[in-house]
Amino acid sequence: MERLPILKIGQMLLVSIQVDLRDDMVVALQEDLADRIVETGARGVVIDITALDIVDSFTGRMLATMAALSRVLDADTVVVGMRPAVAITLVELGLSLDGIKTALDVERGMRLLSLAGGTAR
Amino acid sequence: MTSEPFGDLIDRCRAAEEDLVRRWRADVAASLRGRVSEIELDKELREILDALLSAVSASDGADTRSSAYGEVRALLVDLSRARALQGFSPRETAISVFALKKAVRDSVGVGPEFVAFSDVIDELGLFTFETYAKAREEVITNQAEQLLELATPVVKLWQGVVALPLVGTLDSARAQVVMEKLLQTLVDTGSEYAIIDITGVPAVDTQVAQHLLKTIVAARLMGAECIISGIRPQIAQTIVALGIEFGDIATKATLADALLLALGRIGVDVTAEMTKRGL
Amino acid sequence: MTAQELPISGDADVVRVRQAVRAAAVEAKLSLVDQTKLVTAASELARNTLTYGGGGGALVEQVQNGLRKGVKAVFHDKGPGIADVAQALTDGFTSGSGMGLGLGGARRLVDEFAIDTAPGDGTTVTVVKWAR
């Protein structure tokens, strides 16, 4: 099975989703991410969904779980690049992803993490 | 027997083609009052006549929806769409087809086969009318969309701050367009703050308030914050009376206050900016 | 576009159904937001077909009503069916591991929604989204 790459940039991890997401890939990502946070001691995670043309309740739940997981492992998660149509659809679907930090793009997401002190310590 | 119900009508029409087209064109031109040039009209009508005569002889008496009439129908679609877009009335459009009957009667003469031919013309005339109506509907839909677009300008106030001044009644359809346009502008301009100014909105009902709230939540999912400004007293009362929760959404009395709030959060020093720009 | 029947028997099929629905929605000239809503609804329903129905299929086709074009998608399975449809449509209700937004959420994203099911008799969900 194709696995999503997780890149390490400084004290942060970057997951840039560039393919049509299959459910099993999402589940695998969740496991890989937890492993990588522990392995690298990363303090922040940026999940870039600019290329995703839909986020359904399964993917939404995965994002929420990954954020919660990384929080337990002392890392902050920012979801960046959600497209307007996707955001509108998620709201209509009833998913507000409470507790997840968001930013317009990767750059802003990383800045948000460093402001929160994710990399300063 | 390729065209039995029409006897030798088709052949006679072909023989008298010049006279036929001249009469037909004269009638159509009179009703269009010079708004389509004679040369253009001549070409248009000749093409239709030619396709029609071929279709009638090839159709074996089948109806006008059969494939034999494909070319005629295509030409009539072009004609009625063009007329609709140029603003001609339905009557002026349909006459282009119906006037052919009189032209055939006057130039070829009426025989028993004329009835069948007349039926074909009637069918094609109705087809023209339907296509015309469809084209008009499309024109109207497009205009309505353009109006919606015009009525919702999103302006950039500062690097990172856009504003949406809403004026007039917000119905559900418009609220949706507004929402999409605002969110797209956030992406296009890379803005993290959006000010929705509703000073010019006379009333807010539950649906509109819901749309506003959804826009704000969607903007947050994208990583941007919305500030609502210009909530008038009556609207504030409606919002409370309807039990709509604005929760932790920032609201300000005026657009100016909202802009100051956004600038403050971005970390812009207004005095320093003024000095820099020589103001 | 002619109707297209796609099997749903694995995660990859859910992705294929999404792609087919997207293509049909683009062809029917749905707005970007409406395309996204329909594809998201299709994703939820295809997953339901797979997870709860034990697999099945989806029929995707373009429909027309006067001037308006639209896309219809029918999801069918021969699974255990749903005993209490009203409950299944309620937000937050789930018999599986999802967020319980699948069925009710999908209904909010489309213009027409019909469900035909009985315990032991499979489930068929039909959705339609019209171009604005």
Image (cartoon, coloured by chain):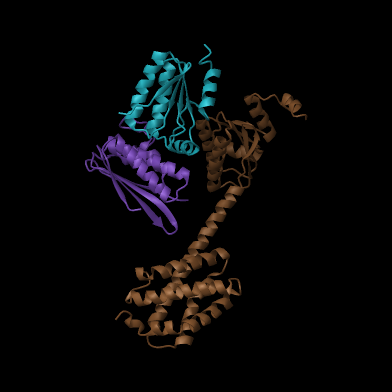
Chain colours: A cyan, B brown, C purple
Residue B56 % position (x, y): 37, 76
Judge whether residue C72 can be spotted in this image: yes
Judge whether residue B94 can be spotted in this image: no
Q: Is residue A13 above or below residue C30?
A: above
Task: Kindly give the residue lying farthest to the top in the view shown.
Answer: A121
Residue A108 % position (x, y): 54, 26
Q: Is residue A22 above or below residue C4?
A: above
**Quarter of the image that includes the N terminus of chain B:** bottom left
Residue B133 % position (x, y): 49, 65
Q: Nearer the viewer, residue A48 or B259?
A: A48
Query: Quadrant of the rendered structure where residue C13 is?
Result: top left
**Quarter of the image that includes the C terminus of chain B:** top right
Task: Kindly give the residue lying farthest to the right in the view shown.
Answer: B279
Is residue C69 left or right of B150 when viewed as pictured? left
Q: Nearer the viewer, residue A112 or B47?
A: B47
Q: What residue do we see at 37% from left, 85% from top?
A: B8
Residue C15 % position (x, y): 34, 38
Is residue B160 left or right of C47 when viewed as pictured? right
Count of numbered tags: 0
Q: Nearer the viewer, residue A114 or B79?
A: B79
Q: What residue do we see at 36% from left, 25% from top?
A: A29
Query: Quadrant of the rendered structure where residue B178 is?
Result: top right
